[in-house]
Amino acid sequence: MKDNRSFFEKLTGSIKMDESEDLDIENTPEKPEKVGPNGEPWFDGEPEEGQLTVDLYQTPTEIVIKSMVAGVKPEDLDIAITRDMVTIKGKRETERFIKEEDYYHQELYWGSFSRTIMLPAEIEVEEADAIEKHGLLIIRLPKIDKNRQTRLKVKG
């Protein structure tokens, strides 16, 4: 079955409205209620958390995750690793002395962010390494070598 949605519709999850469908403008509330993915209402009091963008690729020996974390101090990053999952959390602080009404454009993301990534292969947690240089976070995760063998000596 062919998916006839446009690239934008696939990317955002939006749907194309049929031209024959009429919008009921008279019954549309003036301020729409924010609704989460499960249909539960979101409350304005909750701080919004951004999702970190990443590149993920593998080589024969390791899995590499790259992400732009410009403006975040390395000590403000929290990276939790298991054999099959990585969670990256952090917070990018804004300059507090600038008034909201003084902005012409405000497009950069400020605040908390996180990302949980399911890995395509199991990794050696103890040998993982993370570096940050010029705003680019690089996490290297060595894959478990399932073909590696060792000899055990039997103790008597």
Image (cartoon, helix red, strand yellow):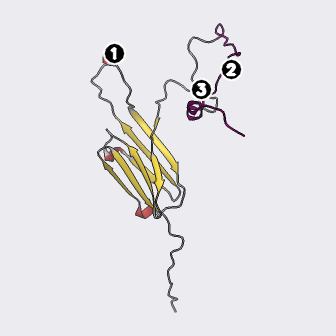
Residue tagged by mark 1? 101
Residue tagged by mark 3? 35
Counting residues from the N terminus, which is met first, the one under dot 1 or under dot 2? 2
* Bounds of the magenta segment: 1-27
Q: CA distance from mark 1 to mark 2?
A: 39 Å
Q: CA distance from mark 3 to mark 2?
A: 23 Å
Q: Amino acid at mark 3?
A: Val
Tag nearer the camera, 1 or 2: 2
In the rendering, at what x and y percent does residue 41 appear?
60, 26
Q: Quadrant of residue 37?
A: top right
Crowding at label 3, few (<14), some or many (≥20) Cα neighbours within 10 Å? few
- Quadrant holding the N terminus: top right
Tag nearer the camera, 3 or 2: 2
Residue 81, compared with residue 89, is above or below; it is below
Q: Amino acid at mark 1?
A: Glu
Outermost residue toward the left?
A: 97
Outermost residue toward the bottom?
A: 156
In the rendering, at what x and y percent does residue 32 appear?
58, 17
CB under 8 Å between callouts 3 and 2?
no
Counting residues from the N terminus, which is met first, the one under dot 1 or under dot 3? 3
Q: Amino acid at mark 2?
A: Asp
Q: Is residue 24 magenta?
A: yes
User: Is 77 on the left or on the right of 48, as rendered?
Assistant: left
Residue tagged by mark 2? 18
Q: Residue drawn 27% across and 24% down?
A: 97
In the rendering, at what x and y percent does residue 65 appear?
43, 51
Q: Residue drawn 41% across and 60% down?
A: 128
Crowding at label 1, few (<14), some or many (≥20) Cα neighbours within 10 Å? few
Q: Residue drawn 57% across and 23% down?
A: 34
